[in-house]
Amino acid sequence: MDETSELSCTDNDMMNPAITMTTQVSAILVLSHVFQIVLKRLGQPAPLAQILAGFVLGPSVLSRAPSIHVFFFQNFAIDFYESMALYCRISIMFLIGLEMDIPYLMRNLRPAGIIACGGCIMCTIFATAISFFVYEETGSRGSRFTMALVITVILANTASPIVFRLAADLKFATSDIGRLAISSSLIGDMYAVFILVIISGEKHKRTVNGWALMAFLSAGLLIGIIFATTYLVNWLNKRNRDEKNLQAVEVMLLCSVILVAAMILETMGFSSIIACFLMGSFFPRGGKSARTLLAILTYTVHNFIFPIYFGYTGFKADTNYLNELKRIAIVVMVIVLSIGGKILGTLAACWYLKTPLNEGILLAFLLNMKGHVDILTLTTAFQNKVVNSSIFYNLMVSSVVISSIISAALIGFLVRRESYTIGIKHIPMEFHSPDKELKLLACVHSRHPLNSMAKLIVSLRGSDNVPISPYFMHLVELPEKIKKKSVFYEQEEDDDSDDEDYNNNDVVEINEAVDVFIEETQMMIHHFQTVAPFVTMYEDICDFADDIRASFIVLPYHKHQRIDGKFENDKEGIRTTNQKVLRNAQCSVAILVDRGHTTTGTQAAGSESLQQIAILFFGGPDDREALGFSKRLSTHHHSSVTVIRFLPVPSKDPNTGINVSQKDDDVVVAIDHQKEIDEADSSALANFYHRYVTSGKVRFQEKYVDNGAQTGMILRDMAETYSMFIVGKGGRGESILTTGISDWEECPELGVVGDFLASSEFDISGSVLVVQQSRRF
């Protein structure tokens, strides 16, 4: 068989494109993992490894070999690649919309818009300046205006999926700068998509009225799809409430609706990128529909689609065209102007917003990530014959890929260098402003403390205008017989992982309670689950709290209250986990002792009834942290907060409270330390009093006692007055206020007062929250 017949046979083999694409995808995945192993040691992010994998596999390196090039680059396989890229874009943008913190975006729309516009405007000016030169030097034909638009997209666009993935991979996606970068990149994407729509219209030569009509129809279709999806999701959530997740058929139905809507918009001549993001943003967050889709998409996109999509971006680059000094100069010029435009525009915007210089530089390089709309714009312009120069196409693709590789490498370096600036910076509740966003991680092992946790979260929301980001984590024990390294399973549940001592309905009831909570309070709560042995579970909790920059961790008590009011011990591993979290967490930690709330469900999270909350202040950093906690609670219109300060009865003996058996030096140190604590307590109370007590938001009482016995009597007298007691764990040293308050201390992790309030002998109906300020401050 001669060569012609062999090629003909190959061209007629309709399975060949599928085989080619499968081989390419597999090679990209393998190569990206190899590069990631090497680059991870250098602190470089995964997207860099994935783009490099595609670059190495493409015509710039391995595909230079004729046999490899013939296999991967077949004319009839191009449509398969473009279709794969389209499906990837739909999945990625829908997931970004589903995970996007929309309240944060709306609160920070102005700074995000200013930063995005700064870079886009500067890059547009540069693109206009060089478009005529590039047009002439690449031998292009067609519309000069269209080429200027294409170069504008290449210089000005920001690939939001890559920024999203970079921020997550380098673990600063939940920081202010990470969220600002993601928000700005989305706005930059919208600008590029708008230009892409104009370029796409050049082929159809539609009139202005025709484009306006098509845009109106597309917007109407998008709005209709969003409403139809919302109705469908609400219906699916109400079906089979005893099931944790949607069935496979129901998932396919939802995915089909989203896919069909995106394909219709593409057919109408409009990119579905922003539409898919909006469909994800408006997708109802509560219920098993969002939980199921988020679990499936997160795993699929992060492990398969992202590597393939980024790898395909690198695969498109062909540096064989860089065989002349003139062409190399064009690529270098585009890269320099792209990076320079972003730096100048972003730094100017950051100077206007008074953003630090180091953060501005990092934002500039983040917003210079390419490979999303850029490749699509070039492909659209070339396929529609709006731009008729293969040299221009390949030079611009090479510019996009090389620019992204340079920016990704510099971002990894900047994140390592500025780890203190963008790293974990926990602010104690003592100094946390109630007007600032609060990130709270609430954990449960079972359904018992759900109602009290829900009440606490709603109370911490404060006024309706104060932002709060609650994260809810279900902790499931991994039995010893199948112990393995623990991992996070977002929104996923494993029936086999529940120990026989746990009620099998816990997972279903917890999911149902969270769904009801979201529906009744209209507050978005991020629901996660971790499966781990109790020995290492604290690591998962602390690591996750660090990743989300949590200000506070709330843990459940290791006992639960029975119907008769007595406490019953849960597993000892729960208590051990609590103790380890108290020792290792970088933020403040509280243990919630649920008393009197043994029912499941949120009951509107107590939003209709007035909660009487008592803050017990004895002195020390933990009590100051509890006092700071009350700032948030006092702003909620269904919470009545009373701060009760315990003071010793004034004594005429100046040596009262000093152990005279100690050495003189020890006595001096003890006095100085106590004086320092007293000064900090007085300052905190004075500031709190003038801001909250004098304004009538909080009531304030002082109780004078001689010893711990009197303190215990006072606490017993107020047992039925309050629905929640909040007290610091300790940190106040030896105090006559608490000495002898109990004959024995059953749970040292609760402190003296907390242990007394949580004891079975202390008959109260209110829950107890024991607060510990992080010992790292």
Image: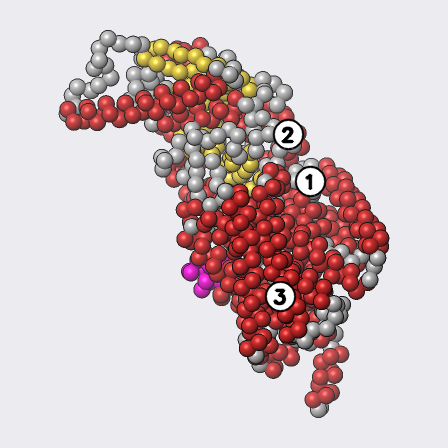
Q: Residues within 10 Å of mark 2 (few under 14, many from 20)?
A: some
> Mark 2 highlights which residue?
521
Marks 2 and 1 close (CB-CB < 8 Å): no
Is residue 206 among the parts visible in the rendering?
yes
Of marks 1 and 3, the one in the foreground: 3
Give the mark nearest the N terminus, 1 or 3: 3
Q: How far is disc 2 from disc 1 in space, using C-alphas?
A: 14 Å
Compared to residue 304, the image places residue 137 above or below, namely below
First to last magenta residue range: 36-47
Frontmost residue, 703 versus 206 = 206
Whether label 1 touches label 3, CB < 8 Å: no
The residue labelled by disc 3 is: 130
- SS class of the residue under badge 3? helix
Residue 491 vertical position relative to residue 706 in the rendered view, above or below: below
Assign a secondary structure to mark 2: helix
User: Is residue 274 left or right of 418 when viewed as pictured?
Assistant: right
N-term mark: 2 or 1: 1
Report which quarter residue 53 is drawn in: bottom right
The numbered mark, 3 or 2, whose residue comes first in the sequence reads 3
> Between 130 and 659, which is closer to the camera in this rendering?
130
What residue would you read off at disc 1?
A: 284
Residue nearest the observer in this picture, 724 or 87: 87
Taking the spot 42% from the left edge, 53% from the top edge, the residue there is 416
Q: Amino acid at mark 2?
A: Thr
